[in-house]
Image: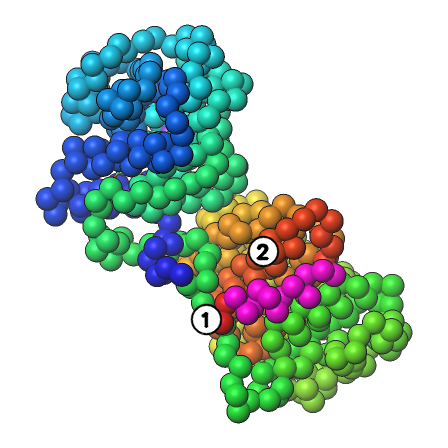
Amino acid sequence: MGEIGDYVLLNPAEMAEADRLTAESGVSYARLMENAGTAVTEAILERYYQMPVLVLCGPGNNGGDGFVVARQLKEKGWPVHLVMHGDRAKLKREAAANADAWTGRIEAFNPDLVSDADMVIDALLGAGLDRDVDGELKTIIEAVNAARKTVVAVDVPSGVDGGTGAVRGAAIEATLTVTFFRKKPGHLLLPGREKAGEVIVADIGIREDVLGPIAGTLWENEPAHWQLPHADPAGHKYTRGHCVVVSGGPLQTGASRLAAEAALRSGAGLVSLAGHRDALMVHANHVTSIMLKEAPQWSALEQVLGQTKARSVVIGPAAGVGQATIENVSIIMQSGAAVVLDADALTSFADAPEELFRFIAFDPSRPVVMTPHTGEFARLFGEIEGSKVDVARIAAARSGAIVILKGSDTVIAAPDGRAFINSNAPAILGTAGSGDVLAGIVGGLLAQGMPGVQAAAAAVWIHGDAAQRFGMPGLISEDLPGILPEVLEGLV
Ligand SMILES: NC(=O)C1=CN([C@@H]2O[C@H](COP(=O)(O)OP(=O)(O)OC[C@H]3O[C@@H](n4cnc5c(N)ncnc54)[C@H](O)[C@@H]3O)[C@@H](O)[C@H]2O)[C@H](O)CC1
Ligand SMILES: [K+]
């Protein structure tokens, strides 16, 4: 496990600042570019035997890195062709110097060069991408993608915005991307993540201490960021916290039961399902260690929360959209318990999101975590401009809740601006009930007193790791709670 700072993600402006601070400390840009090219060459030599390679260089420093790679591979005896897009005479300083040091030809693009190569090095555009790709550049990118060669991208696949993961017009589909110093958000956010292939981070001599002044608040979600609650040897089920999960009606009990099972498996000392008697009778056919508490309406739920001393409450999974859920949310928000708002608990406020945000503001001392997918998110927050990280951060600030914006690139954002991009979730996790399990894991961790942001980030990672451990097609949500002990054992 690394340090938190290892997982910070730098957007292009922050990366430029890292370069500048490094240059100030006496490491030249020429040295950084040489090191960048060398890192790419080494990654290639570690993975591949010699083969015919086409290096594509663009008009900026990304192209400069390409000239370094071309020179080094040629020195190793590789057959290298090199194409430059843009005007050779306009290359600046270090890029121009490396173009001068290239002893081979600079060729004009022609699709046969792609067909004749077995590997393509993509050094067309990196952090300097500032507009959509079109014209010859787009033709080159499309020709490379159509040829299905091994493609090694320098820094980011050209056309992917390193800050947001957006594809600007067209983007290279890389097999391997070698980036420098730290990953960029665009390596983890879709669709950029799918274009990048394997991502490796190379040390090019940028000093670690430059991170201090940059002080990024966006990280890849990794266990280094959180500490699971210790099971105190002197503790008992009451000290490990009681999580109450609100049930749906008798024909909609599965979702809340999945959440309850996940909460218990995540280490909550006690878990209760609360709802109508009819629904509890259905649950009774399925659960053993989970308790059942009658709470046909908000006033009874208030009593249950008091009697159980609930430390966390999960509401939403098939809870029903409408007034009853709104009233339940209102009562839960005043109980002092940490709260997980999912699914129907979010949709119930589609017409009056400000009312929900007022409930959240009742008591800023207890965490509220909301777990929307994109549809639920839009119902509460409308259309927000920006990357998935921007959007989640704005929603967290506006609502006062910790927002888990779900997807294969789930983003966790806190009202104070801290955010995490999760990257360990396999595609098999997109299955019915998967979100209910996630809500339950968050509830289980909150019941044990874990701070809200950490509980949210840990739950998302644990959920992804459980699916990875299942590792086969055919995963159903019922499989997940049973895998949680294995995941948790790996973390303590
Ligand atoms: N970060 C580091 O420490 C180091 C980075 N290196 C490499 O440098 C690039 C970033 O270089 P920069 O010159 O800033 O940008 P680019 O090479 O990505 O491109 C700028 C160039 O491209 C033009 N341009 C932008 N968008 C388009 C477009 N859609 N179509 C056509 N042309 C476009 C723009 O006008 C400029 O002319 C970084 O990624 C690293 O690879 C260092 O070499 C090592 C140190
Ligand atoms: K590139």
Q: Is residue 278 left or right of residue 260?
A: right
Q: Magenta stretch containing residue 480, yes or no?
A: yes
Coordinates of residue 479 in the picture (x, y in percent): 72, 60
Secondary structure at badge 1 equals: loop
Name the image quarter holding residue 476: bottom right
Secondary structure at badge 2 equals: helix
Q: Amino acid type of disc 1?
A: Gln
Coordinates of residue 169 in the picture (x, y in percent): 48, 25
Q: Residue 464 carries which label?
A: 2
| On screen, residue 461 above or below 201 | below
Between marks 1 and 2, how big is the CA–CA gap?
A: 17 Å
Q: Give the range drawn in magenta.
A: 478-490
Other residues around mark 2 within 10 Å, as few (<14) / some (14–19) / many (≥20): many
Ligand 2 within 8 Å, label 2 CB: no
Q: Residue 65 carries which label?
A: none
Residue bearing mark 1: 227
Give the residue at x 62% y 86%.
237
Q: Magenta stretch containing residue 47, yes or no?
A: no
For marks 1 and 2 on the same chain, the one whose residue lies earlier in the sequence: 1
